[in-house]
Image (spheres, helix red, strand yellow):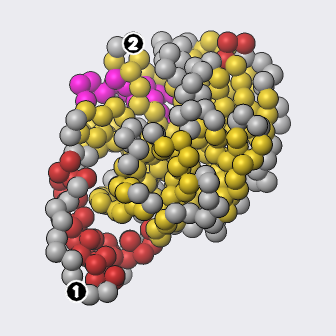
């Protein structure tokens, strides 16, 4: 049974973040923003001007009191010690921002919007240093990579996943999930004849703490894991995680040889997945003497064989569409915070996971 943090908002909660001091921030519809103690008590509330939905919140990795919040086409910088008027605002995106990410040195901020554009802000000069325009539909998520402050990943409703370096205007590497899904579909023996194909629109992504592995959640209910090597990445794992779209994925604490991933879906389920070395790194096979298409079929077969090894450590029937999930350790316990179309935040205990 979930505990409820229900005294911070009057509108649906859309976004969550936590800082190193275990202070939680939540953003909601109509400009609502709340700061919480780790006990779940609101310690600050703010209504951002314009009444636009607060679609993203993230704390500075360098200063735990600095909070970035996106609402409408604007990113506000706030000081949670004296929550009030923004310290500064950036209005550089032309359409509504869906996701923001700050690199680990707190020098760059990326904002992905409905036009498919990612604006990268230099936080020292307070100017846009790069405009990344390659997505042909809504850019739903963007994330900087740990240990590589100039490198970021984006995904969108054009079904494309891209690896960028801020120094370049073009992606270093990109993958179309629709092409990957076609290979997977060809090998899916469980698919019944005439089954409707659900396009893998990319909704969410998360990068592991090592910076070389990331996961992407899509509308077809699947989670795909990729490994980055240099200037490219390759799909290593694909598994069916939800019966509807995967609205959120989020890595949580890692132990040697083990990777735990949270996922939330439009089916109202919240799951914890155990991505160990045996599943994230399928055995290599001899390269075929055929074109790239044959090679991709071999890779898809490898992933199909690895997928049954992916185990769900915990699956919670939350019952509501998941807007955001966040793994944390609060008051000495591992928990997952869940935001949904209600005005409350649900808190589930994860036990010894």
Where 15 sits versus 234, above or below?
above
Which part of the image, by quadrant, shows the N terminus?
top left
Residue 190 located left or right of residue 316 = left
Categorize mark 1 by other alpha carbons within 10 Å: few (<14), some (14-19), many (20+): few
Question: What percent of the width, then of the height, locates residue 20?
Answer: 49, 20
Residue 349 located left or right of residue 58 = left
Give the residue drawn at x 23%, y 55%. 281
Which part of the image, by quadrant, shows the C terminus?
top left
Q: Quadrant of residue 80?
A: top right
Where 271 sits versus 233, above or below?
above
Q: Quadrant of residue 294?
A: bottom left
Q: Could one spot residue 336 in this view of the protein?
A: yes
Question: What percent of the width, then of the height, locates residue 285?
Answer: 16, 70
Residue placed under numbered mark 1 in the picture? 289
Residue placed under numbered mark 2 in the picture? 331
Question: What percent of the width, then of the height, locates residue 53?
Answer: 71, 39
Q: Which residues are magenta?
A: 334-353
Q: Quadrant of residue 197?
A: bottom left
Give the residue drawn at x 71%, y 60%. 115
Question: What percent of the width, then of the height, locates residue 282?
Answer: 20, 59
Categorize mark 2 by other alpha carbons within 10 Å: few (<14), some (14-19), many (20+): few
């Amino acid at each position: 049974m979930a505990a409820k943090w229900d005294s911070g908002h009057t509108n649906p909660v859309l976004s969550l973040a936590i800082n190193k001091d275990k202070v939680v921030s939540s953003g909601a519809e109509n400009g609502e923003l709340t700061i919480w103690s780790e006990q779940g008590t609101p310690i600050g509330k703010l209504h951002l001007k314009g009444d636009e939905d607060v679609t993203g919140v993230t704390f500075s990795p360098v200063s735990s009191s600095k909070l970035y919040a996106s609402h409408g086409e604007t990113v506000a910088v706030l000081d949670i010690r004296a929550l009030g008027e923004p310290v500064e605002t950036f209005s550089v995106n032309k359409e509504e921002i869906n996701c923001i990410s700050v690199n680990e040195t707190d020098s760059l901020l990326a904002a992905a919007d409905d036009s498919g554009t990612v604006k990268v802000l230099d936080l020292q000069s307070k100017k846009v240093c790069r405009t990344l325009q390659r997505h042909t539909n809504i850019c739903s998520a963007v994330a900087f990579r740990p240990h590589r402050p100039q490198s970021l990943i984006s995904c969108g409703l054009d079904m494309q996943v891209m690896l960028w370096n801020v120094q370049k205007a073009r992606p270093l590497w990109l993958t179309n999930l629709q092409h990957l899904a076609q290979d997977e579909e060809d090998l899916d023996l469980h698919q019944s004849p005439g089954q409707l194909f659900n396009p893998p629109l990319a909704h969410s992504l998360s990068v592991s703490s090592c910076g070389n592995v990331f996961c992407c959640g899509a509308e077809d209910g699947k989670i795909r894991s990729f490994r980055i090597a240099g200037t490219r990445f390759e799909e290593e794992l694909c598994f069916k995680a939800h019966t509807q779209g995967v609205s959120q994925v989020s890595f949580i604490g890692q132990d040697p040889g083990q990777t735990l991933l949270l996922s939330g879906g439009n089916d109202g389920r919240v799951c914890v997945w155990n991505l160990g070395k045996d599943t994230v790194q399928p055995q290599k096979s001899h390269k075929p003497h055929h074109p790239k298409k044959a090679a991709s079929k071999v890779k898809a077969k490898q992933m199909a064989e690895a997928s049954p090894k992916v185990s769900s450590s915990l699956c919670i029937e939350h019952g509501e569409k998941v807007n955001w999930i966040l793994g944390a350790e609060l008051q000495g316990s591992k928990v997952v915070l869940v935001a949904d179309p209600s005005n409350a935040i649900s808190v589930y205990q994860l036990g010894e996971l």
